[in-house]
Image (spheres, helix red, strand yellow):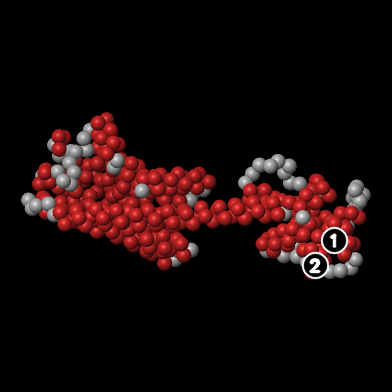
């Protein structure tokens, strides 16, 4: 879970650098960073080191504050992304501040030697310790419920099926985490009242908590995985098309070297492919009068890629090595290049390039 949160935080921070004024993205990046920091603090070695450097109990309070703030930021993301009433955020912000102040106060009111308490500590009958967990778990119940409701609401209008599934999985995991928080609250109340530890709740909570974290993790990862797979597929497609269009591009480059936009080889494969596509298109427009002459009256706009490849070979042969300065020959429509659909251009130009190759 921590690794997923760290990767997600870095990913969204990079996106935020590109779009610094995107408020929903800002909230999401902050959410992931806060949750990652909180889960890092829950690691025993980190908890021990922080408490040793500051004071017993600081790590526990810091963990809760960071996770609370992360969940609040996630609610803020949904509110900002859907354009909903922001007064709810003000209420949630005030509630968060109140809960944090109460928990800090309860920790300060606890004897310094007892601030390293856990749910299994025998000191659970002390009011400041018991109420620390009661208040914390009550807020977790509220936060998980709020985020889960927003996830379900957002899922109904999700732009893609994968995003909808991811949000439903996250909502289901959040519901499980809410139940574990309720169970922990019951555990604390029973212990505070002097009752025996409810081992049945522990038997339920451990597997439920693990399963819930798995669901939330899958829900968080699924959109990123789909996005990554799509990016890889797009990269592979453009790399293949970049290579396939090379015969046509080479012919146009040799005929009209001044049309080459950038003689460098840098840039992403997407940029290089579209640059090469534009150069091929411009070259064919320049060559079109000679193509029309090679076609001898045939309608080149309806010619097949193989026929056009033959006309292009002939056109390149009859084209003067040095055209007269200022000579402007009228362009002729070929290969459906007048359409606005870039995918049509790609299909036609790649088809011609294959025939030329």
Name the image quarter holding residue 118: top left
The residue that appears at 75% across and 65% down in the rendered structure is 336
Position in image of residue 147 (x %, y %): 34, 57
SS state under label 1: helix
What residue is pinned by disc 1?
A: 311
The residue that appears at 37% across and 53% down in the rendered structure is 217
- Residue 193, visible in the rendered structure: no
The answer to whether mark 1 and mark 2 are in CB contact below 8 A is yes
Q: Is 105 in front, or is 195?
A: 195
**From what the image shows, is residue 304 above or below residue 249?**
below
Marking on residue 303: 2
Within 10 angstroms of label 2, few (less than 14), some, or many (20 or more) residues?
some
The residue that appears at 90% across and 62% down in the rendered structure is 293
Position in image of residue 267 (x %, y %): 64, 44
Q: Is residue 219 left or right of residue 320?
A: left
Within 10 angstroms of label 1, few (less than 14), some, or many (20 or more) residues?
many
């Amino acid at each position: 879970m921590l690794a997923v949160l760290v990767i997600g935080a870095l990913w969204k921070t990079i996106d935020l650098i590109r779009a610094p004024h995107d408020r929903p993205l800002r909230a999401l990046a902050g959410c992931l960073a806060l949750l990652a920091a909180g889960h890092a603090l829950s690691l025993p070695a980190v908890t021990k080191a922080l408490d040793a450097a500051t004071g017993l109990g600081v790590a526990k309070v810091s963990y809760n504050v960071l996770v609370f703030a992360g969940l609040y930021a996630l609610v803020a993301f949904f509110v900002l992304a859907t354009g909903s009433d922001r007064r709810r955020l003000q209420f949630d912000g005030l509630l968060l501040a109140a809960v944090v102040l109460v928990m800090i106060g309860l920790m300060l009111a606890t004897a310094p030697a007892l601030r390293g308490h856990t749910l299994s500590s025998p000191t659970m009958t002390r009011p400041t310790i018991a109420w620390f967990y009661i208040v914390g778990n009550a807020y977790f119940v509220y936060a998980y419920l709020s985020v889960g409701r927003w996830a379900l609401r957002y899922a109904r209008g999700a732009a893609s099926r994968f995003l909808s599934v991811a949000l439903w999985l996250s909502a289901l995991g959040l519901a499980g985490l809410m139940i574990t928080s309720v169970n922990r609250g019951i555990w604390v109340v029973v212990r505070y009242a002097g009752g025996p530890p409810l081992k049945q709740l522990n038997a339920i909570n451990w597997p439920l908590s693990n399963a819930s974290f798995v669901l939330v993790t899958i829900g968080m990862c699924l959109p990123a995985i789909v996005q990554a797979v799509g990016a890889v597929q797009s990269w592979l497609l453009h790399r293949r098309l970049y290579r396939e269009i090379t015969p046509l591009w080479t012919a146009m480059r040799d005929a009209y070297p001044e049309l080459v936009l950038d003689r460098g080889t840098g840039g992403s494969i997407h940029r290089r492919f579209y640059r090469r596509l534009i150069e091929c298109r411009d070259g064919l427009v320049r060559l079109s009068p000679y193509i029309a002459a090679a076609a001898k009256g045939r309608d080149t706009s309806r010619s097949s890629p193989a026929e056009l490849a033959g006309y292009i070979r002939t056109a390149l042969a009859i084209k003067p090595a040095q055209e007269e300065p200022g000579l402007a020959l009228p362009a002729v429509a070929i290969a459906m290049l007048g359409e606005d659909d870039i995918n049509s251009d790609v299909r036609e130009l790649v088809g011609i390039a294959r025939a030329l190759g």
